[in-house]
């Protein structure tokens, strides 16, 4: 039929092999078998769906048992838990992050106009309390919660197409249609990301008791629990995608491989998750997953202490917090002693550090220069990227601007490599030609009105790579007569200055080295907080021109193409539109990159099997979840 | 005495009110608010947040109200014993603070006892045997203790612990005991872990107290009353304990006043490094995340404890030293 279905079917084929398990051949963990023998749990064949997903283990069929130790931090590190158990959405990412594959939906079809998707759920799949998972759970969220103004003042943007939220239509118990107001080619990809989990996040039979629509006694419940309103109570009990409360209620049914035993609360010093007896995947030998009994997630606030725990061999898998480039030597050095191997985390970002020239700065003295492309080109030629790469990134990257990395289907050579040569002579000549040909006693350039041209750059205190890089660039730019001040500040101030457009240059990594369509913030000014080439342009875009500042013609063209791309029904045409965006972004050149994103490293215990030696590291691909930790096992 | 205490207690009310105002102002002075911080945290993981969604959150948490209204909502709740809600954890502030205060109390009191147990005898010894080998030895040790920052000592000890003894990284319990109910075995486990932070936290305190004790005692040892007592034939030990040490003890008692607020704010960095489930790290998180009611409750608690602690040490001082009068 269509490319998506083909890809999905193909991927399902490679993932599952051709093996079909018969009910009698299912096996389960010894602890669960004991509960079945005592009559406290139905037999495994009754707990699994009629056709459980058959997962082909990475290396071999594993064995049951063990507790996987990992570390999370104390301050709002809820996503660390999410990344271990995975966002169990209708779809998930293929392990290589190339395309979405079936997950809670065993298959799906797209209508020719790309507006309607029919998802086929797994008959007999159950929530972690044994209640069936059906189309009603999806319509509950999509048709009720998305449209409730109290619960979502505005439905999350990933489910809004052409100004309207998607809606759901129940075909039968196990078939549901998601219908968008306009073509939405990206939907299966969006559903595979952590933010696309909403349709399968809430178990209706449990969560409906916290809603006014389904519970007439709600006022009593609110009074008894001392909650101000029902959305607060609902989120406290059933969670939401990115709040810690999601992992604070052991009663809440989920579809995850492990469920909460010791919750993640403000005072928690560890979070323990135990296996979900109703988990809906089996391996090729018919063993119900997960293999590993428990996740022991220790709360450690200090990153250095996590590194210490890792090199002491106290963490079986740690890919978060310790994966900075400067930790690599110490992790490598202690590998033998700690009994672990390095887990390679391939980057999905584009540029490890970039300079976002504020096109709408409120600083009238620097604004004419920052908005001049020739000025930005000259400054880019004045950056010695090899020196930055050697000193800050230990030689692991290469000189790079922005945009998809080589190997991605959208790779655009000009966008990635233009103006990356170090050429101070040419930079000086260009700056002279722009009218900055007079200099003061220290050799810094003066504007035609005789004032010294002084640029400032904003860096977050936590972003040490940005600060180190800017220190080098400050020296390099002094050679072309540009005086730079480095402002380091706390995150909240950095974001406040972003909103007020009071900075000259912002610093941040650039996403989009792989699957650039998921986050094009550096290419098109659409990210309300982080499109630092101009937040007023973003406001102009999101309010339809009512607020903010009118963007440059090139950016307006990109915004138009981006809107067309979003609503395109033809994949080939969509790709062509996005290539135009990339090419126009290369012309615009508002964001100047330094060095390409570098591979970083986590640790993996040598006793842990079925972990691929390398995995992409991203938020949209919430590693390690898409590599299926439920099929990891202890050798 | 009774009147003194009564007057002090009476003065505490208005003082704490002023404190609560400045605490609230200080929290609100930082740029942005909780919602902006939340949005920034989401942005760091790649999400675009709708402005309408943020506005709705501000409204739900009352962050769009004028400062004075927000303050009134907070303080009127506090007076009734309702400290508000932590935005970050979606939990009442009282529960969050209560969870952590018990262990913090244990740690602080044991640290104090350790500090005194070390500083008192060494201080006396150094003063009495001035310029002896022992004096020099302890002086050197004391200066090292003062100079080494606690968190560094913590990291070094932890490194040794992990790489040599394969002990756990930080924490006050071994994993099986973390969430276990209280039992004799759990207390033993706590004791096995408690000494590391106790020693680290106590080191710099003990070092400075040794110096103070030594200096104070030296002042006293050459006073005429000491010579008089000695001339009258009092034994050296009785003399020392009964008169000069009693006077020199004043600084020890004064420090009791600082111990109580230290329950909350002391050793924040060390607690983070050593991963102790005490109040400090939670306070720091609340401040960084601008979780205003949680942070406000902590700061208010600290100020109250300072006031109470000062009162306590004043009373103790008066009992100990007859030269101090209430007027």
Image (cartoon, rainbow, N blue to C red):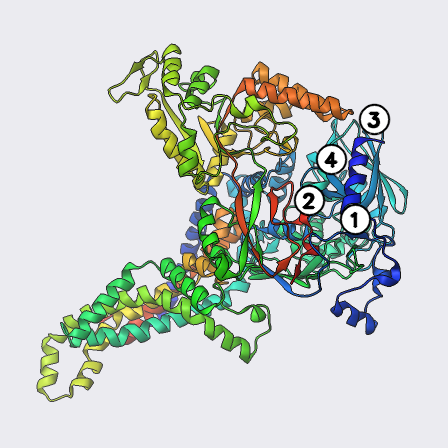
Q: Which residue is mark 4?
A: A159
Q: Residues within 10 Å of mark 3 (few under 14, many from 20)?
A: few
Q: Earlier in the sequence, mark 4 or mark 2?
A: 2
Q: Which residue is mark 3?
A: A113
How far across and how far down the image is residue A265, in percent?
A: 60, 57
| Subunit that carries the residue with mark 3 | A
Tell me the quarter of the picture where residue A290 sits: bottom right
Q: Determine the CA span between mark 2 and mark 3.
A: 29 Å
Residue B310 seen in render: no
Are both tags, 2 and 3, on one chain? yes
Q: Secondary structure at mark 2?
A: loop
Q: Which residue is mark 1?
A: A16
| Quarter of the image where the N terminus of chain B is located | bottom left
Q: Earlier in the sequence, mark 3 or mark 4?
A: 3
- Seen in the picture, residue B16 relative to B314 is either above or below; the reply is above
Q: Which residue occupies 74% across, 29% down?
A: A161
Q: Determine the CA span between mark 3 and mark 1.
A: 30 Å
Residue A580 seen in render: yes
Q: Which residue is mark 2?
A: A95
Q: Residues within 10 Å of mark 2 (few under 14, many from 20)?
A: many
Confirm or deny contact between disc 3 and disc 1 (CB under 8 A).
Answer: no
Question: Which of label 2 and label 3 is nearer to you?
Answer: 2
In the rendered view, does B107 fall on the left or right side of A234?
A: left
Are both tags, 3 and 4, on one chain? yes
Q: Determine the CA span between mark 2 and mark 1.
A: 13 Å
Question: Which of label 3 and label 1 is nearer to you?
Answer: 1
Confirm or deny contact between disc 4 and disc 2 (CB under 8 A).
Answer: no
Q: Earlier in the sequence, mark 4 or mark 1?
A: 1
Per the rendering, the mark at residue A629 is: none
How far across and how far down the image is residue B224, in percent?
A: 9, 77
Q: Earlier in the sequence, mark 2 or mark 3?
A: 2
């Amino acid at each position: 039929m269509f490319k998506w279905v083909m890809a999905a079917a193909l991927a399902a084929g490679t993932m599952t092999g051709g093996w079909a398990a018969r009910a009698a051949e299912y096996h389960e963990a010894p602890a669960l078998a004991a509960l079945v023998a005592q009559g406290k749990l139905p037999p495994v064949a009754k707990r699994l769906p009629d056709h459980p997903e058959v997962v082909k283990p990475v290396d071999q069929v594993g064995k049951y048992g063990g507790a996987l130790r990992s570390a999370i931090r104390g301050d709002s590190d809820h996503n660390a838990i999410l990344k271990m158990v995975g966002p169990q959405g209708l779809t998930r990412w293929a392990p290589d992050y190339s395309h979405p594959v079936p997950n809670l939906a065993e298959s799906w079809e797209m209508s020719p106009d790309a507006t309607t998707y029919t998802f086929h759920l797994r008959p007999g799949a159950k929530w972690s309390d044994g209640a069936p998972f059906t189309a009603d759970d999806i319509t509950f969220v999509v048709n009720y919660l998305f449209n409730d103004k109290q619960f979502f003042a505005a439905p999350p943007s990933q489910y809004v197409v052409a100004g309207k939220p998607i809606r759901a239509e129940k075909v039968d118990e196990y078939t549901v249609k998601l219908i968008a107001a306009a073509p939405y080619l990206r939907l299966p990809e969006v559903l595979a990301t952590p933010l696309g989990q909403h349709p399968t996040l809430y178990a209706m039979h449990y969560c409906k008791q916290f809603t006014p629509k389904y519970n007439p006694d709600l006022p009593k419940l609110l009074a008894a629990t001392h909650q101000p309103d029902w959305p607060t109570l609902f989120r406290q009990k059933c969670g939401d995608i990115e709040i810690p409360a999601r992992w604070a209620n052991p009663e809440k049914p989920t579809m995850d491989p492990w469920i909460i035993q010791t919750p993640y609360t403000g005072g928690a010093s560890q979070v323990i998750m135990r296996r979900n007896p109703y988990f809906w995947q089996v391996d090729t030998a018919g063993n119900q997953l997960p293999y590993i009994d428990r996740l022991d997630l220790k709360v450690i606030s200090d990153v250095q202490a996590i590194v210490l725990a890792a090199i002491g061999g106290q963490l079986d898998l740690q890919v978060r917090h310790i994966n900075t480039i400067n930790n690599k030597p110490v992790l490598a050095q202690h590998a033998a002693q700690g009994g672990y191997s390095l887990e390679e985390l391939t980057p999905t970002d584009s540029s490890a550090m970039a300079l976002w020239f504020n096109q709408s700065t409120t600083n009238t003295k620097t604004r004419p220069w920052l908005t001049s492309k020739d000025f930005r080109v000259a400054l880019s030629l004045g950056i010695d990227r090899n020196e930055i790469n050697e000193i800050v990134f230990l030689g692991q990257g290469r000189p790079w601007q922005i945009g998809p990395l080589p190997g991605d289907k959208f790779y655009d050579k000009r966008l990635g490599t233009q103006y990356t040569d170090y050429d101070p002579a040419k930079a000086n000549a260009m700056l002279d030609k722009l009218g900055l040909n007079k200099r003061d006693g220290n050799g810094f350039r003066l504007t035609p009105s005789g004032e010294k041209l002084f640029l400032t750059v904003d860096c977050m205190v936590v972003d040490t790579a940005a600060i180190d890089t800017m220190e080098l660039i400050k020296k390099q730019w002094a050679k072309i007569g540009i005086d730079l001040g480095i402002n380091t500040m706390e995150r909240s101030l950095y974001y406040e200055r972003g909103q007020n457009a009071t900075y000259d240059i912002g610093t941040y990594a650039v996403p989009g080295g792989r699957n650039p369509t998921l986050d094009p913030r550096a290419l098109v000014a659409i990210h309300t907080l982080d499109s630092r080439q101009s937040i007023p342009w973003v406001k102009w875009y999101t309010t339809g021109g009512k607020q903010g500042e009118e963007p440059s013609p090139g950016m307006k063209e990109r915004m138009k193409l981006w809107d067309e791309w979003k609503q395109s029904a033809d994949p080939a045409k969509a790709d062509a539109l996005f290539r135009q965006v990339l090419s126009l972004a290369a012309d615009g050149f508002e964001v100047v990159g330094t060095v390409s994103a570098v591979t970083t490293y986590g640790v993996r215990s040598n006793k842990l099997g079925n972990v691929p030696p390398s995995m992409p590291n991203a938020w949209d691909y919430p590693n390690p979840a898409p590599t299926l930790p439920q099929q990891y096992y202890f050798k | 005495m009774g009147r003194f205490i009564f007057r002090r207690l009476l003065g505490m009310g208005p003082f704490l009110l002023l404190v609560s105002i400045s605490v609230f102002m200080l929290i609100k002075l930082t740029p942005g608010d909780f919602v902006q911080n939340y949005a920034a945290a989401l942005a760091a993981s790649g999400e675009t947040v709708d402005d309408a969604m943020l506005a709705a959150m501000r409204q739900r948490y009352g962050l769009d109200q004028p400062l004075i209204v927000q303050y009134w909502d907070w303080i009127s709740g506090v007076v009734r014993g309702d400290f508000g809600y932590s935005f970050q954890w979606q939990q009442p502030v009282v529960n969050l603070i209560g969870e952590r205060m018990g262990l913090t109390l244990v740690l602080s009191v044991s640290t104090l006892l350790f500090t005194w147990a070390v500083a008192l005898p060494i201080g006396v010894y150094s003063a009495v045997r001035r310029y002896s080998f022992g004096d020099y030895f302890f002086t050197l040790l004391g200066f090292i203790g003062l100079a080494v920052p606690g968190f560094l000592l913590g990291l070094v000890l932890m490194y040794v612990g992990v790489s040599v003894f394969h002990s756990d990284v930080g924490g006050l319990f071994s994993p099986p005991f973390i969430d276990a109910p209280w039992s004799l075995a759990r207390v033993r486990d706590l004791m096995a872990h408690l000494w590391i932070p106790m020693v680290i936290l106590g080191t710099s305190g003990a070092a400075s107290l040794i110096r103070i004790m030594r200096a104070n005692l030296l002042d006293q040892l050459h006073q005429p009353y000491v010579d008089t007592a000695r001339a009258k034939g009092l034994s050296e030990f009785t003399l020392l304990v009964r008169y000069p040490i009693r006077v020199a003890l004043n600084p020890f008692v004064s420090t009791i006043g600082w111990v109580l607020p230290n329950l909350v704010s002391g050793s924040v960095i060390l607690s983070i490094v050593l991963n102790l489930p005490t109040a400090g790290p939670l306070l720091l998180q609340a401040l960084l995340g601008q979780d205003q009611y949680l942070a406000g409750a902590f700061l208010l608690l600290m100020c109250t404890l300072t006031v109470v602690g000062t009162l306590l040490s004043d009373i103790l001082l008066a009992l100990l030293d007859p030269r101090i009068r209430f007027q």
